[in-house]
């Protein structure tokens, strides 16, 4: 079943220089007898505009792979590069890659609109423009009424939608979402995923979502399956990895 150094993404129609390329990338935590190989040498590419689900059980290495792709972590062997994003350093990459985390990630003392505007301010966007882009992102996610609320005045689903707005307002070229619906009920999760994918579409951003939920995975165009730190071929749907990505 395992396919060491398996290549995922090569069945996807190339639509440009890959945003992320993993070449035999591996990540081992610790050393010696206590070492945990979270990701074995795997190779994959994320083309522009791709919509990919990384599916696998808890502990299979999904988050580790996402962190490597985001530049938040470095492989202990092999290479992760971002040729389609200019192969910048971590700070440069942060301007192109938006990350949605599973849990609450809003800053408690800031209102929703301030939370959305903050990363743009850090990027150097002028206050007025950051504010108007933040408000527009909240409107597009149906959150305009909540712009002035603090995070602890929001439901979990509303807070996660604000976190999605915060990522999308920066107009990233790649969105990496780590179990973005994992802490939400099914209906709220469906709404969050829908706005995430819809807005990413408008921005022509590629999206990679990790999930253990096949229902979530089916909303994406391509499914990659992970087990024991390796990418494996789809077991139940041989065509799943071969769907074309829209240009
Ligand atoms: N900082 C760490 N130190 C040691 N081991 C770690 C660390 N982070 C992750 N691991 C281990 O690496 C393996 C992969 O973890 P990872 O979080 O990538 O899996 P996952 O598929 O995202 O799991 P989940 O769905 O539960 O989030 C697991 O065995 C985990 O225990």
Image (cartoon, rainbow, N blue to C red):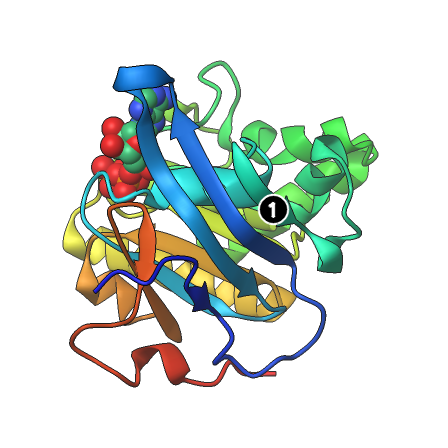
| Mark 1 C-beta closer than 8 Å to ligand 1 | no
Q: Is residue 155 left or right of residue 106?
A: left
Q: Which residue is mark 1?
A: 80
Q: Nearer the viewer, residue 102 or 232?
A: 232
Point out the quarter of the image occupied by ligand 1: top left
Residue 75 % position (x, y): 53, 36
Q: Residues within 10 Å of mark 1 (few under 14, many from 20)?
A: many
Q: Which residue shows up at 54% across the image and 31% down it?
A: 73
Q: Please provide percent x and percent y for residue 25.
A: 51, 46
Q: Could you tell me which residue is drawn at 19 percent across and 65 percent down?
A: 215
Q: Is residue 78 left or right of residue 83?
A: left
Q: From this view, report whether residue 139 is shown above or below residue 17.
A: above
Number of numbered discs visible in the structure rendering? 1
User: x, y percentage for residue 197?
Assistant: 45, 64
Residue 52 locus on image (x, y percent): 42, 65
Q: Is residue 178 left or right of residue 234?
A: right
* The one of 222 and 131 positioned closer to us in this rendering: 222
Look at the numbered disc 1 and give the secondary structure of its residue: strand
Q: Is residue 152 visible?
A: no
Position of residue 236 relative to residue 161, above or below, is below
Residue drawn at x 74%, y 54% is: 85
Above/below status of 49 relative to 12:
above
Q: Of residues 146 and 218, which is closer to you in this image?
A: 218
Q: Quadrant of residue 178?
A: top left
Asked if residue 132 can be seen in this view, the reply is yes
Q: Left or right of 37: which side holds 148?
A: right
Give the position of the C terminus as an image quadrant: bottom right
Q: Camera-side residue: 2 or 137? A: 2
């Amino acid at each position: 079943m395992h396919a060491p150094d398996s290549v995922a993404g090569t069945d996807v129609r190339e639509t440009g220089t890959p945003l992320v390329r993993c070449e035999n990338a591996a990540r081992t935590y610790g050393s010696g007898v206590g070492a945990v190989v979270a990701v074995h040498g795997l190779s994959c590419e994320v083309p522009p505009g791709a919509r990919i689900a990384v599916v696998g059980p808890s502990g299979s290495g999904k988050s580790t792979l996402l962190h490597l792709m985001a530049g938040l972590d470095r492989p202990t062997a092999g290479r992760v590069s971002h040729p389609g994003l200019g192969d910048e350093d971590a700070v440069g990459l942060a301007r192109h890659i938006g990350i949605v985390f599973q849990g609450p990630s809003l800053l408690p003392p800031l209102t929703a609109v301030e939370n959305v505007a903050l990363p743009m301010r850090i990027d150097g966007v002028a206050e007025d423009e950051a504010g108007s882009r933040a408000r527009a992102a909240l409107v597009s996610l149906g959150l305009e009424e909540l712009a002035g609320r603090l995070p602890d005045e929001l439901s979990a689903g509303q807070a996660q939608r604000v976190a999605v707005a915060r990522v999308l307002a920066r107009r990233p070229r790649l969105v990496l979402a780590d179990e973005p619906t994992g802490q939400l009920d099914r209906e709220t999760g469906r709404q969050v995923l829908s706005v995430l994918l819809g807005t990413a579409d408008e921005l022509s951003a590629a999206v990679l979502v990790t999930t253990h939920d096949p229902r979530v995975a089916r909303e994406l165009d391509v499914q990659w399956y992970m087990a024991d730190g390796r990418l494996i071929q789809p077991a139940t749907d041989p065509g799943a990895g071969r769907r074309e990505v829209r240009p």
